[in-house]
């Protein structure tokens, strides 16, 4: 995918067509990792060490997914630390049956798919400083589908509740005495987590929840629609031109088919209700919030720097990530990712006099860290922050204002020094 979906495709993949001046390829070339050793015979066409990077990607990805399976399903690494965060007189040890195996396997399936998608997007972004829609659009649809079919594939939350959650399974801890009528539940991090799911957001006939879900969906459809900002005649005229262009695209294939069939599917899941709707609405909100944050950063950066500060592929990438991890994780990724990007950007600006860096890999790295270390970041006061819902937009607003000021200062420094 890294070579076939790039803007400038290269005939390196053993699954693609054989270059005209290369010897015929065989089935052995398609064996993961080992096949690249045989493809070294194409060095004269692609370069002496072209085979090293894809070999290492396949090797590290395979080992990484195996380690992820061990962490999530054997060690219960996303669940057990949350259980032990409660004030027990002793540490709860890992034991079979604490949670059903199918619960953790749902999460692993979604996380493995997301890691594969992020790996492809990251290396294409490194090579060409672009993230193709051929990855983020199917990835977003797949994230929404997995959330609907596997409601517990979202990040886990362990809660002690007297009432059962909208989605969740009891956690078995036989040696712990609980208050009368209370149980531990393993539940997904839903839209309102750590609070209970409100009745106003349930499925039919609560039409308000349908409006919210449809708004998120059409927000994404607008984001992926081809459009160009033409502001020479003022913002009103520019918005009018964009509206016309998007309207035309919504009557054409493939965007029109995706948009209208997706809208009907959302309405059908809303009518069905139950766990599928809870998880789907959570995934849709994750899409809108995660992508919306990066979109705002892009606008703020463009205004402050006087040029495009971030590619739109970063926006659609975070929309995809949000469907898998939810909006709470998206907010945390928003704060974590810039640290690595800032360090690399400063080094590159000083050594190469170039401040253009691909930001997608840092978003993916932040997403991976949040995913793997979820119990740690979730229990470090983040639950309290998200419990007070109004505080989140206030903090984000302060961050955006600060970002605008810092980028303006950086622009002045860069102008005077470089």
Image (spheres, rainbow, N blue to C red):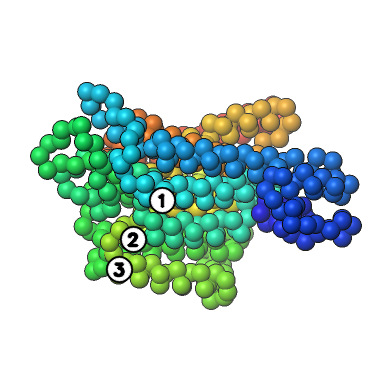
Marking on residue 272: 3
Look at the numbered discs 3 and 2 and tell me whether their residues touch, using CB distance below 8 Å.
yes
Q: In the rendered image, which quarter is residue 206 located in?
A: bottom left
183 left or right, relative to 289: left
Q: Quarter holding the C terminus?
A: top right
Residue 78, position as x, y percentages in the image: 39, 38
Look at the numbered discs 3 and 1 and tell me whether their residues touch, using CB distance below 8 Å.
no
- Residue 235, can we see it? no
Label 2 element class = helix
Q: Residue at x 71, y 35 (%)?
A: 354
Residue 312, position as x, y percentages in the image: 58, 52
Label 3: how many Cα within 10 Å (few below 14, some 14–19, many 20+): few
- Residue at the extreme left of the image, as rendered: 180
Rendered position, 385 above or below 16: above
Label 3 element class = helix
Rendered position, 334 above or below 351: below
Q: Which residue is mark 2?
A: 276
Q: Quarter holding the N terminus?
A: bottom right
Q: Nearer the viewer, mark 1 or mark 2?
A: 1
- Residue 109, can we see it? yes
Q: CA distance from mark 1 to mark 2?
A: 14 Å
344 left or right, relative to 179: right
Q: Residue at x 78, y 57 (%)?
A: 26
């Amino acid at each position: 995918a890294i070579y076939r979906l790039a803007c400038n495709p290269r005939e390196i993949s053993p699954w693609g067509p054989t270059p005209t001046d290369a010897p015929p390829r065989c089935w052995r070339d398609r064996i993961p990792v080992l096949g690249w050793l045989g493809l070294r015979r194409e060095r004269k066409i692609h370069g002496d060490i072209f085979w090293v990077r894809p070999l290492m990607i396949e090797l590290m990805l395979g080992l990484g997914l195996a380690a992820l399976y061990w962490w999530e399903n054997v060690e219960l690494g996303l669940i057990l630390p949350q259980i032990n965060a409660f004030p027990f007189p002793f540490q709860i040890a890992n034991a079979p049956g604490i949670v059903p195996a199918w619960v953790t396997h749902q999460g692993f399936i979604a996380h493995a798919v997301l890691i594969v998608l992020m790996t492809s997007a990251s290396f294409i972004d490194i090579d060409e400083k672009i993230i193709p829609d051929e990855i983020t659009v199917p990835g977003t649809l797949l994230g929404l589908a997995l959330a609907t079919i596997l409601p517990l594939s979202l990040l886990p939350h362990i809660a002690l509740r007297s009432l059962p959650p909208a989605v969740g399974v009891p956690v078995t801890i036989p040696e712990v005495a609980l208050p009368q009528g209370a149980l531990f539940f393993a539940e997904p991090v839903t839209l309102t987590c750590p609070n209970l799911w409100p009745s106003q957001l349930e499925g039919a006939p609560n039409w308000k929840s349908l409006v919210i879900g449809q708004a998120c969906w059409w927000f994404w459809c607008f984001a992926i629609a081809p459009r160009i900002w033409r502001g020479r005649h003022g913002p009103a005229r520019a918005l009018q031109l964009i509206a016309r262009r998007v309207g035309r695209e919504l009557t054409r294939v493939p965007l029109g088919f995706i948009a209208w069939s997706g809208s009907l599917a959302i309405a059908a899941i809303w009518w069905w209700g139950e766990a599928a709707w809870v998880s789907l609405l959570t995934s849709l909100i994750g899409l809108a919030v995660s992508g919306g944050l990066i979109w705002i950063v892009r606008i703020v950066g463009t205004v402050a720097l006087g040029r495009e500060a971030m590619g739109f592929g970063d926006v659609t990438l975070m929309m995809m990530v949000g469907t898998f991890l939810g909006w709470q994780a998206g907010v945390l990724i928003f704060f974590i990712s810039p640290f690595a990007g800032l360090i690399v950007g400063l080094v590159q600006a000083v050594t190469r006099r170039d401040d253009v860096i691909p930001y997608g890999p840092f978003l993916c790295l932040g997403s991976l860290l949040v995913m793997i270390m979820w119990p740690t970041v979730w229990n470090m006061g983040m639950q309290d922050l998200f419990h007070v819902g109004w505080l989140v937009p206030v903090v984000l607003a302060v961050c955006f204002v600060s970002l605008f000021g810092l980028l303006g200062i950086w622009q002045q420094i860069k102008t005077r020094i470089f």
